Amino acid sequence: LARRLVAPLAAALYSAEPFGGSIDHHHSFVVAYRHSGGDRGLDLHHDASEVTLNVCLAGDFSGGGLRFCGQFGSGTHRAAHCVASHAVGQAILHLGRQRHGADDILTGERYNLILWARSSAFRAAAAYGHIPPDGYPKAAEQGEPDRECLSRSNDDDYEEQLRRLQERVRAAARLGL
């Protein structure tokens, strides 16, 4: 799957990336989301991969969209981009540094195959300092983050950003906006 499908797609779709056509290994696992008795969703994060393939394997569910924000290291990493709906038999391919998370399942359960595709050459070049690691250097944040792109688990300033957003909402309400 990684060699015959993901590597050629990554080379075609992400040819401008420093890992280019050098995807050569992967780490795969299955995740389950359940409305009752399990994980309903997954907080926003970026992956330990150059490219990620997310395949909806099975389930009868509602909700649980895959939310995308900006790219790790960019000034807009907490800016909302889109929410993709999952359906059994469909796959989503994205850069590993793309900030994303699974919205909560509202009913039922869903199983997904996750394949993190990696490049040994890219990782070695970054480890030896020949190129910056993915997502570095980090750019200064541009503007205010979108609420739906804040991560309780992965943003050191989560509470501060939430407080700021709540203050702006109260100020707008006082002004009648």
Image (tube, rainbow, N blue to C red):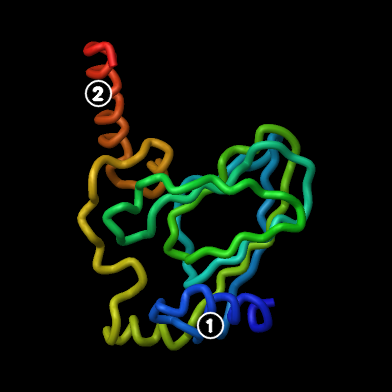
Q: From the viewer's perspective, is 102 left or right of 31?
A: left
Q: CA distance from mark 2 to mark 1?
A: 45 Å
Q: Position of residue 27 (x, y in %)?
A: 59, 72
Q: Position of residue 53 (x, y in %)?
A: 60, 66
What amino acid type should be assigned to the residue bearing mark 1?
Ile
Nearer-the-camera pick, 85 or 116? 85
Which secondary structure lies at badge 1?
loop
Q: From the viewer's perspective, is 65 left or right of 151?
A: right
Q: Is residue 160 above or below residue 98?
A: above
Name which residue lies at 30% across and 46% down: 156
User: Where does the N terminus fall, quadrant-wise?
Assistant: bottom right
Name which residue lies at 47% across and 67% down: 48
Q: Position of residue 94 (x, y in %)?
A: 52, 63
Q: Is residue 71 above or below residue 145?
A: below
Q: Position of residue 35 (x, y in %)?
A: 69, 35
Q: From the viewer's perspective, is 70 left or right of 96?
A: left
10 Å neighbourhood of mark 2: few (<14), some, or many (≥20)?
Answer: few
Which secondary structure lies at badge 2?
helix
Q: Is residue 82 above or below residue 6?
A: above
What amino acid type should be assigned to the residue bearing mark 2?
Glu
Which residue is tagged 1?
A: 23
Nearer-the-camera pick, 127 or 170? 170
Residue 7's tag is: none
Which residue is tagged 2?
A: 167
